[in-house]
Structure formats: C-alpha cells, structure tokens
Amino acid sequence: IYDNMKTAVDKVGRGKQRQVNKRFHAMVGHYLYEPEFCNPAAGWEKGQVEKAVLDARHGLWYDTPPFKSLHELNLWLHDRCQALWPETAHPQMKNRSLAECLADEQSKLMPVPAAFDGFIEISKRVSSTCLITFEHNRYSVPASFANRVISLRVYPERLVIVAEAQVVAEHVRVFNRHKSPGQTIYDWRHYLSVAQRKPGSLRNGAPFLELPDSFRQLRARLIKRPGGDREMADILALVLLHDERQVERAVARSLELGEVSKQHVLNCLSRQGEPSLPQPLKPPPALKLVTEPEANTARYDQLRRSSNDP
C-alpha cells in the first residue's frame, strides 16, 4: 500500500484512479506486483503501518552510531533488522518470532529478480564549456560532447551521463543547502582534448586545479621551461591509453629521479609493463625421460673415425 507520493503518482484521479509515472510503472512490472494507493486525506487507512514503523524505531535506533554515508547507514540498518528478527514476535502469531516464520516461508517464496535500475532520466544540453546543470549545480562532461544533447540518469547518490548508448561520465550527486549557491564539479579527464589544443589552460584552468599531487608537482616544474605546457598536456593524455595509477607511479618515479620530461615519464611507464619471468613448468610423469642425456662430446670422435676409414 502506497501513499500518493510524487515519486510514484503524477496525478490523483477519482476513487482508485491514479496516473503513475513511467519509472514507477517500470518498477512494478519488473517485480510483478499490483500497487495499491491510499485515498487522499484518509490518514486512518495507513495508521497501522505508521504505528508499526514508530514502534520499530524504538528498537532500531537505540544507541545509533554515526554514519559517513547513506550506503553505510543502509548496511547497518539491514544487519540491525535481521538481528532483531529472532526477538520480535509475529503480529498475528504471537508465540512465534519473525525469524521462525521466515524460515518456514522461505522455501515457498519466489526468487527475487535482479535489482531494478531505479533512475530518473532527463535530457540535457551540454554547454560550450562542457557542463550540464542539475539542481543549481554544474557537472562536467567529456569535451567531445560540447553543445550536444545527452541523457542524464539521476540516482539518489550519483549522476550517470549517457550518450550514444554508452556511459561517458559519472559524478557523485551534490546536495546544496536551501538558497546556497550552486557548485561546479569538474573531472579534469573530460578536458584533456581541450588541453591538447590549448596547453596554456593547464596553468590556471579551473578543471585542472584538482589534479593528483604528483601531477601538480610535475606541472609546477614543467611550466617553467619553454614548451612545458605542451609536454604536460601530452603526459596527462597518457591516462587515456594506460591505467591512471600506472601513469601516476611513473610521474612519481620521474620526480624522484629528478628527470622531469615526457620521454622520461614514458620510459618509467614502459618499464612498469615489463613481463615477469615465466614460472617453471612441471612436466607430467609420462613426459619424463627414462635415460637422462649426457653432455659427452667424446661421442663425436666415433663419427670422425668412421669418416676416415678406407
């Protein structure tokens, strides 16, 4: 039974008529059940449910630890609920616990399908500065999609950007306090093609202010020399072809050795990819030699004597 929340109902009609939104309808079809909705302004229809939730809170939220994220809270809540099942009586069968009733019913239940991909999809146009706006915040998009329309999938904690049927970017969703100014969330990788065309943007460009520490140290040294901007842009572009952690290690190694150049970073990067020596093989008994070969060159004298015989 659902209340007429906006996340499910677009319009409340007469009686039981409801116009549900597309994503809620898709979720109902995914899990194969029929939803029921309360009548508007009829609080008595959901009183038992709300009272049960209120009673459960006293046991669940007693001595609650702090949480760093909503995901961490949900994990704790999942474990806490399961821990209370053996101690909680069934609402109809008072002499049995919830854990006992679940054990009896579990073999008769249908398997749960794969989790529903619950997102809200919105079309957005990317600005000329490779940004989209959502809830007063701006998020970066790869520069190749500037001035184009993309699809934004909104999840509770993240935003996924899809273009040409592929995920091209992902950001942690940012929430602002009421009437607070919006934020701009950059991913410097999205602007690498811009840096290739305009290497000077690496000096003070906003997307490149939050580079990893090793990259910032390298930039501080390279921009002091002629052509250093171009060299830095080429080094950053290596993350498009290699694992980013390997590139960071190569840059850090180059800084340790005091040789800061594109060629030296490439050299450090290539040495990380050297293949390890193969492990010795143990042949099966059927392939082992019965008679071990001998390193005896005197046997060749027999061939020499036979060739000189008349």
Image (cartoon, rainbow, N blue to C red):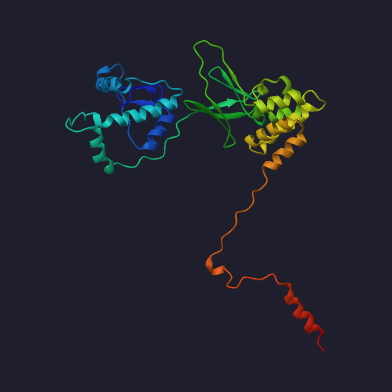
**Rendered position, 41 above or below 1:** above
Give the total of numbered labels: 0
Q: In which quadrant of the rendered view does residue 32 lie?
A: top left
In the orientation shown, which residue stands out farthest toward the top?
A: 179
Q: In which quadrant of the rendered view does residue 30 lie?
A: top left
Asked if one can make out residue 196 in the rendered structure from this viewpoint, the answer is no
**Rendered position, 161 above or below 287:** above
Looking at the picture, tell me which residue is in the foreground, 226 or 200.
Answer: 226
Looking at the picture, tell me which residue is in the foreground, 55 or 221.
Answer: 221
Asked if one can make out residue 83 in the rendered structure from this viewpoint, the answer is yes
**Image point (73%, 30%), residue name:** 233
In the orientation shown, which residue stands out farthest toward the bottom?
A: 310
In the rendered image, residue 273, in percent from the top left (x then y), is placed at 67, 44
* Quadrant occupied by the N terminus: top left
**Image point (37%, 37%), residue name:** 31
In the rendered image, residue 6, in percent from the top left (x then y), is placed at 40, 21
In the displayed structure, does residue 4 sit left or right of residue 129? left
In the rendered image, residue 58, in percent from the top left (x then y), is placed at 29, 19
In the displayed structure, does residue 86 sit left or right of residue 236? left
**Image point (63%, 28%), residue name:** 148
Looking at the picture, tell me which residue is in the foreground, 294 or 51.
Answer: 294
In the displayed structure, does residue 265 sit left or right of residue 97? right
Q: In which quadrant of the rendered view does residue 140 lie?
A: top right
In the rendered image, residue 203, in percent from the top left (x then y), is placed at 73, 21
Looking at the picture, tell me which residue is in the foreground, 290 or 104.
Answer: 290
**Rendered position, 141 above or below 54:** below
* Quadrant occupied by the C terminus: bottom right
